[in-house]
Image: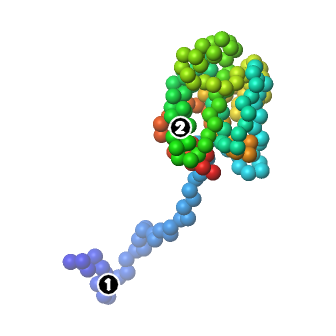
Amino acid sequence: MALAACDAPGTAPQAPSRRVDAVAAATTKKSVTADFCDVHSEGAEAPSFSYPELAEPAPTPSRAWRWINVWATWCAPCVAEMPLLERWRQRLGQQGKAVDLVYLSVDDDAAAVAAFRETNGVGRGPRVRAMDALTPWLTMLGLDSAASIPIHIFVDPNGKVRCVRRGALEAHHFDDVAQLVAQ
Protein backbone atom coordinates (compact mmCIF):
# COMPACT_ATOMS: atom_id res chain seq x y z
CA MET A 1 0.00 0.00 0.00
CA ALA A 2 2.79 2.41 0.77
CA LEU A 3 4.12 2.15 -2.76
CA ALA A 4 0.74 2.76 -4.38
CA ALA A 5 1.57 6.45 -4.81
CA CYS A 6 4.82 5.77 -6.71
CA ASP A 7 4.98 5.68 -10.51
CA ALA A 8 5.00 2.20 -11.94
CA PRO A 9 7.91 1.38 -14.26
CA GLY A 10 7.22 2.35 -17.85
CA THR A 11 4.52 4.94 -17.09
CA ALA A 12 4.65 8.47 -18.46
CA PRO A 13 6.50 11.03 -16.34
CA GLN A 14 4.35 13.21 -14.16
CA ALA A 15 4.29 17.00 -14.42
CA PRO A 16 6.68 18.68 -12.01
CA SER A 17 5.29 19.20 -8.57
CA ARG A 18 4.69 22.65 -7.17
CA ARG A 19 6.29 21.38 -4.01
CA VAL A 20 9.84 22.58 -3.39
CA ASP A 21 12.54 21.48 -1.07
CA ALA A 22 12.97 24.17 1.52
CA VAL A 23 16.37 25.32 2.55
CA ALA A 24 16.73 26.26 6.15
CA ALA A 25 17.25 29.99 6.41
CA ALA A 26 19.74 31.31 8.88
CA THR A 27 17.86 32.42 11.93
CA THR A 28 18.61 35.84 13.22
CA LYS A 29 17.65 36.44 16.79
CA LYS A 30 16.46 39.97 17.25
CA SER A 31 17.94 41.55 20.33
CA VAL A 32 15.63 42.47 23.15
CA THR A 33 16.58 46.09 22.73
CA ALA A 34 15.28 46.16 19.16
CA ASP A 35 11.86 45.04 20.35
CA PHE A 36 11.77 46.81 23.71
CA CYS A 37 13.47 50.16 23.13
CA ASP A 38 12.10 53.05 21.11
CA VAL A 39 15.67 54.38 20.88
CA HIS A 40 18.66 52.07 21.22
CA SER A 41 22.38 52.79 21.04
CA GLU A 42 25.41 50.63 21.57
CA GLY A 43 29.11 51.13 22.18
CA ALA A 44 30.83 54.33 21.16
CA GLU A 45 27.77 55.66 19.34
CA ALA A 46 25.70 55.70 22.54
CA PRO A 47 25.28 59.24 23.87
CA SER A 48 26.43 60.14 27.37
CA PHE A 49 23.58 60.66 29.81
CA SER A 50 22.88 64.04 31.30
CA TYR A 51 19.84 65.32 33.15
CA PRO A 52 17.77 68.25 31.93
CA GLU A 53 17.96 71.37 34.06
CA LEU A 54 16.80 70.30 37.52
CA ALA A 55 15.08 72.05 40.41
CA GLU A 56 17.28 70.18 42.90
CA PRO A 57 20.65 68.42 42.76
CA ALA A 58 21.04 65.37 40.53
CA PRO A 59 21.77 62.05 42.24
CA THR A 60 25.41 61.03 42.30
CA PRO A 61 25.94 58.46 39.54
CA SER A 62 27.17 55.05 40.55
CA ARG A 63 28.97 52.34 38.62
CA ALA A 64 25.73 50.36 38.32
CA TRP A 65 23.06 50.54 35.65
CA ARG A 66 20.78 53.54 36.14
CA TRP A 67 17.12 53.33 35.29
CA ILE A 68 15.65 56.82 35.00
CA ASN A 69 11.85 56.82 35.20
CA VAL A 70 10.32 60.08 33.96
CA TRP A 71 6.97 60.52 35.71
CA ALA A 72 4.47 62.93 37.24
CA THR A 73 1.99 62.76 40.10
CA TRP A 74 -0.89 63.51 37.69
CA CYS A 75 0.11 60.69 35.30
CA ALA A 76 -2.05 57.65 36.17
CA PRO A 77 0.09 55.09 34.25
CA CYS A 78 3.23 56.51 35.89
CA VAL A 79 1.83 56.15 39.38
CA ALA A 80 0.34 52.71 38.67
CA GLU A 81 3.67 51.24 37.53
CA MET A 82 5.83 52.56 40.39
CA PRO A 83 5.27 49.60 42.78
CA LEU A 84 6.10 47.24 39.90
CA LEU A 85 9.34 49.09 39.17
CA GLU A 86 10.34 48.91 42.82
CA ARG A 87 9.72 45.15 42.91
CA TRP A 88 11.72 44.71 39.71
CA ARG A 89 14.64 46.72 41.09
CA GLN A 90 14.73 44.42 44.12
CA ARG A 91 14.36 41.30 41.98
CA LEU A 92 17.18 42.41 39.67
CA GLY A 93 19.37 42.98 42.73
CA GLN A 94 18.60 39.47 43.95
CA GLN A 95 19.75 38.21 40.54
CA GLY A 96 23.06 40.05 40.96
CA LYS A 97 22.13 42.92 38.60
CA ALA A 98 22.54 46.14 40.55
CA VAL A 99 20.24 48.85 39.20
CA ASP A 100 19.79 52.35 40.59
CA LEU A 101 16.17 53.38 39.99
CA VAL A 102 15.84 57.16 39.83
CA TYR A 103 12.48 58.88 39.52
CA LEU A 104 12.64 62.13 37.52
CA SER A 105 9.48 64.14 38.14
CA VAL A 106 8.15 66.57 35.55
CA ASP A 107 5.65 68.11 38.00
CA ASP A 108 5.55 71.89 38.26
CA ASP A 109 4.39 71.73 41.88
CA ALA A 110 7.21 70.73 44.27
CA ALA A 111 4.73 70.45 47.16
CA ALA A 112 2.60 67.93 45.23
CA VAL A 113 5.68 65.78 44.56
CA ALA A 114 6.77 65.94 48.21
CA ALA A 115 3.27 64.97 49.39
CA PHE A 116 3.13 62.10 46.90
CA ARG A 117 6.51 60.78 48.06
CA GLU A 118 5.51 61.03 51.70
CA THR A 119 2.19 59.24 51.16
CA ASN A 120 3.40 56.53 48.76
CA GLY A 121 7.02 55.97 49.79
CA VAL A 122 8.19 55.99 46.17
CA GLY A 123 9.26 58.60 43.68
CA ARG A 124 12.57 59.67 45.21
CA GLY A 125 14.67 61.63 42.79
CA PRO A 126 15.05 65.06 41.24
CA ARG A 127 12.42 67.25 39.63
CA VAL A 128 12.78 69.01 36.28
CA ARG A 129 13.14 72.76 36.77
CA ALA A 130 10.50 73.61 34.15
CA MET A 131 8.75 71.95 31.25
CA ASP A 132 10.68 74.10 28.76
CA ALA A 133 13.85 72.39 30.02
CA LEU A 134 12.35 69.02 29.11
CA THR A 135 11.77 69.62 25.39
CA PRO A 136 15.41 69.84 24.20
CA TRP A 137 16.34 67.00 26.54
CA LEU A 138 13.76 64.66 25.01
CA THR A 139 15.05 65.53 21.55
CA MET A 140 18.62 64.80 22.67
CA LEU A 141 17.44 61.35 23.82
CA GLY A 142 16.05 60.70 20.34
CA LEU A 143 12.39 61.19 21.22
CA ASP A 144 9.82 63.55 19.83
CA SER A 145 9.73 66.74 21.88
CA ALA A 146 6.12 65.97 22.78
CA ALA A 147 6.77 62.37 23.92
CA SER A 148 4.32 61.25 26.56
CA ILE A 149 5.27 59.89 29.96
CA PRO A 150 6.17 57.58 31.52
CA ILE A 151 9.55 57.36 29.84
CA HIS A 152 12.20 54.83 30.84
CA ILE A 153 15.89 55.56 30.22
CA PHE A 154 18.49 52.85 30.81
CA VAL A 155 22.03 54.14 31.34
CA ASP A 156 24.91 51.67 31.43
CA PRO A 157 27.61 51.73 34.13
CA ASN A 158 29.79 53.87 31.83
CA GLY A 159 27.15 56.62 31.72
CA LYS A 160 25.95 55.85 28.17
CA VAL A 161 22.27 55.88 27.23
CA ARG A 162 21.57 52.38 25.95
CA CYS A 163 17.76 52.34 25.77
CA VAL A 164 14.90 54.81 25.85
CA ARG A 165 11.34 53.51 26.02
CA ARG A 166 8.06 55.41 26.10
CA GLY A 167 5.00 54.11 27.88
CA ALA A 168 4.14 52.17 30.99
CA LEU A 169 5.74 48.79 31.61
CA GLU A 170 3.75 45.66 32.32
CA ALA A 171 4.63 42.39 34.06
CA HIS A 172 5.70 40.68 30.81
CA HIS A 173 8.44 43.30 30.27
CA PHE A 174 10.56 42.11 33.21
CA ASP A 175 12.60 39.68 31.11
CA ASP A 176 13.34 42.46 28.61
CA VAL A 177 14.61 44.73 31.37
CA ALA A 178 16.64 41.92 32.96
CA GLN A 179 18.26 41.06 29.63
CA LEU A 180 19.02 44.71 28.91
CA VAL A 181 20.81 45.36 32.22
CA ALA A 182 22.77 42.11 31.88
CA GLN A 183 24.57 43.40 28.77
Residue 56, located in which quarter of the rendered image? top right
Residue 10, located in which quarter of the rendered image? bottom left
Nearer to the camera, 6 or 125: 125
Q: Residue at x 73, y 37 (%)?
A: 61
Nearer to the camera, 23 or 37: 37
Give the amino acid at mark 1: Thr
Q: Is residue 169 left or right of residue 55?
A: left
User: If the image is split into quadrants, where does the N terminus sit?
Assistant: bottom left
Residue 92 vertical position relative to residue 24 in the rendered view, above or below: above
Q: Earlier in the sequence, mark 2 or mark 1?
A: 1
Neighbours of disc 1 within 10 Å: few (<14), some (14-19), many (20+)? few
Q: Residue at x 62, y 34 (%)?
A: 101
Query: Marks 2 and 1: CB-CB under 8 Å?
Result: no
Residue 104, located in which quarter of the rendered image? top right
- Write down the residue under mark 1: 11
Secondary structure beneath label 1: loop
Query: Residue 102, image x and y in percent?
Result: 65, 31
Give the amino acid at mark 2: Gln
Query: Residue 6, image x and y in percent?
Result: 30, 79
Q: Residue at x 54, y 16 (%)?
A: 119
Q: Which mark is residue 90?
A: 2
Secondary structure beneath label 2: helix
